[in-house]
Amino acid sequence: MNEQKRVIWSWFPVTLITAFFCCVLWGSASPAIKIAYELFRIGSEDTASRIMLAGSRFVIAGVMTILFGSLISRQLLVPKRESWKKIGVLALFQTVGQYYFFFMALANTSGVRGSLINASGNFLAILFAVYLFHLEKMTLRKIAGCLVGFAGIVLILGGGKALLDGGGLKLAGEGAMLAACCFYAASGCLIKICSRDENPVVLSGYQFFFGGLVLLAIGAVMGGRLVFYSPACAANLIYMGFISAGAYTFWGILLKHNPVSRVSILGFINPVMGVLLSALFLQEQNEAFSAAGIGALLLVSLGIIIVNSGGSPAPAAHDKSR
């Protein structure tokens, strides 16, 4: 039976379909969050309620991840005693820090821009891994991929002149998304370090859960509230939890049964789905299918392909928790 599973998950059509499914989930994160703001009636100025929404999502994601991982392992996943410190550090970076800024950004920028800027985490992870955590060495391929990818980010922000003039970036919007990407890049490196002697599903599941609790507490202290105006609110919140838990679990299965490079290179689908789903559900067709939007998407996707086309992928490729 185990051999059959191995063959099924390593069969390229299954790998491709499963990776596509994961990228659809991750790509739907930005539209789902912006739709949640409307369903829960959370204004762009209501930071406390946004933090509570983020916390609720990751408490659910944590429970789902632990449950899915336990079912796959056929035993309850419980951290080792010495793992709690790692879980605390990861929760601080991967959930609390990253999603404080991520949820703020999506209240102040479009889904298309958010999805494309979010992809810069793939390139920042390489810089962090090389120069901050010293996990790998820089190569010409990585440099080329980062330059191409960042060119796409600059393009969607209006080009170099717009950035120099200050017109292409808002601190609470695009600036917050870049801050979220820095936390994402750091957490990708940290989970690579921490998972050397620990199950990464255990680490991610529990850090999702406890990071979510911290965000909930912060939001509550700040006076935030979540009002379920309709059943759609609950359905949206459960779906947002499943985005992280479901995609992370299936991506982990693919990494287990395939060469890492084969799986991670398919991550270029992620920003593609983010842009397309934002255009579909948020009526952002004009930005998504503009010359700048299409050009930025092509450059970002090409950059991801280049950096993952040989050798070890960026550390964050192991942990796309959006």
Image (tube, rainbow, N blue to C red):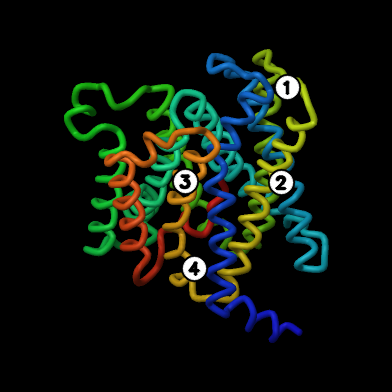
Q: Nearer the viewer, mark 4 or mark 2?
A: 4
**Residue 112: percent from left, percent from top:** 43, 37
Q: Quadrant of residue 315?
A: bottom left
Q: Closer to the camera, 91 or 86?
A: 91
At 66% across and 45% down in the image, what residue appears?
Answer: 207
**What amino acid type should be assigned to the residue bearing mark 1?**
Leu
Would residue 52 be found to the left or right of residue 127 on screen?
right
Task: Give the answer, above or below, for where 254 lies relative to 273.
Answer: below
Residue 263: numbered disc: 4
Task: Give the answer, above or below, for where 281 lies relative to 5.
Answer: above
**What amino acid type should be assigned to the residue bearing mark 2?**
Gly
Classify mark 3: helix, strand or loop. Answer: helix
Classify mark 4: helix, strand or loop. Answer: helix
Query: In 3D space, how far apart are the residues under numbered discs 4 and 2 (Cα atoms)?
Result: 24 Å
Q: Nearer the viewer, mark 3 or mark 4?
A: 3
Residue 226: numbered disc: 1
**What amino acid type should be assigned to the residue bearing mark 3?**
Leu
Residue at the limit of the structure toward the right, as seen here: 75
**What amino acid type should be assigned to the residue bearing mark 4?**
Val
* Quadrant showing the N terminus: bottom right
N-term-proximal mark, 4 vs 2: 2
Q: What residue does disc 3 label?
A: 276
Query: In 3D space, how far apart are the residues under numbered discs 4 and 1 (Cα atoms)?
Result: 37 Å
**Residue 146: percent from left, percent from top:** 28, 53
N-term-proximal mark, 4 vs 1: 1
At 28% across and 40% down in the image, what residue appears?
Answer: 292
Q: Residues within 10 Å of mark 1 (few under 14, many from 20)?
A: some
Q: What residue does disc 2 label?
A: 62
**Residue 122: percent from left, percent from top:** 40, 51
Classify mark 1: helix, strand or loop. Answer: loop
Query: In 3D space, how far apart are the residues under numbered discs 3 and 2 (Cα atoms)?
Result: 27 Å
Residue 239: numbered disc: none
